[in-house]
Amino acid sequence: MIRMITGKNGKGKSKVLLEKVNEEVKTVLGNVVYIDTTTKHMYELNNKIRLINASEYMLDTSDKFLGFLSGIISQDHDLQQMYFDNFLKLANISISEIEGVVKELELLSDKFGVDIYISVSTSDGDIPASLEDKVLIAL
C-alpha cells in the first residue's frame, strides 16, 4: 500500500507525516523506518522508529534509491511501515517521473507487505491522475 501526503512547500506535510508515524508506531506489530534527507526531525520521532538520513548515501538516481530500499527491506523481515519525507528529493526525481517510481514502490510494498507513506511537494494538480487514489491528504 502506498499513501501520499501532497501539497506546496511550507504547507505542513512533514508535520503531518511525523504525526502519522508517531501515532502508527503505537499500534504496529513490526518495525517502522523513517527516511529523510536530514536528521532535523530526530527528536520529534518516537524512539522505536528507525531514522535514516539518506543524504549520507550516494543515492543520486531513482534506481539507486529503489535498490537502497530493497536492501533495507531485505535486512528486516519484521519491517511493516516506511515513511519518506521530501520524496522527490529522496528519489532524485521530478514530479513528471513520479508515476514510474511509485509503481516500482508499489511492487516492493505488495511483495514484502510493507506499507509506504510519502510526502510530495507539488503544485495543485501536479499529481498524475493515475496516482490520485493514493493521496491520503492534500494540503
Image: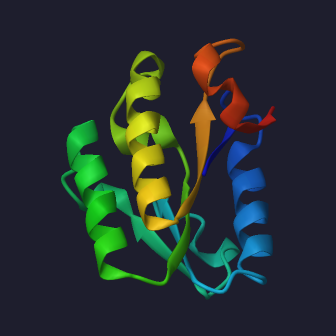
Q: Residue at x 41, y 47 (%)?
A: 107
Q: Residue at x 70, y 67 (%)?
A: 21
Q: Position of residue 52 (x, y in %)?
A: 42, 69
Q: Position of residue 88 (x, y in %)?
A: 45, 35
Residue 61 is left or right of residue 90, and the answer is: left
Q: Quadrant of residue 47?
A: bottom right
Residue shown at the point (51%, 66%) measured from the top left: 113
Question: On screen, 71 above or below 49?
Answer: above
Q: Is residue 128 above or below residue 135?
A: above
Q: Quadrant of residue 49?
A: bottom right
Pick the residue in front: 84 or 100: 100
Could one spot residue 7 in this view of the protein? no
Q: 96 or 29, which is in the foreground?
A: 29
Please determine whether, in this image, residue 124 is positioned above or below residue 12. above
Relative placement, left or right, of 13 versus 93 is right
**Which residue lies at the image location 66% right of the left edge and 86% below the top edge?**
29
The foreground one among 95 and 30 is 30
Determine whether 55 is above or below 103 in the image: below
Q: Position of residue 77 (x, y in %)?
A: 40, 82
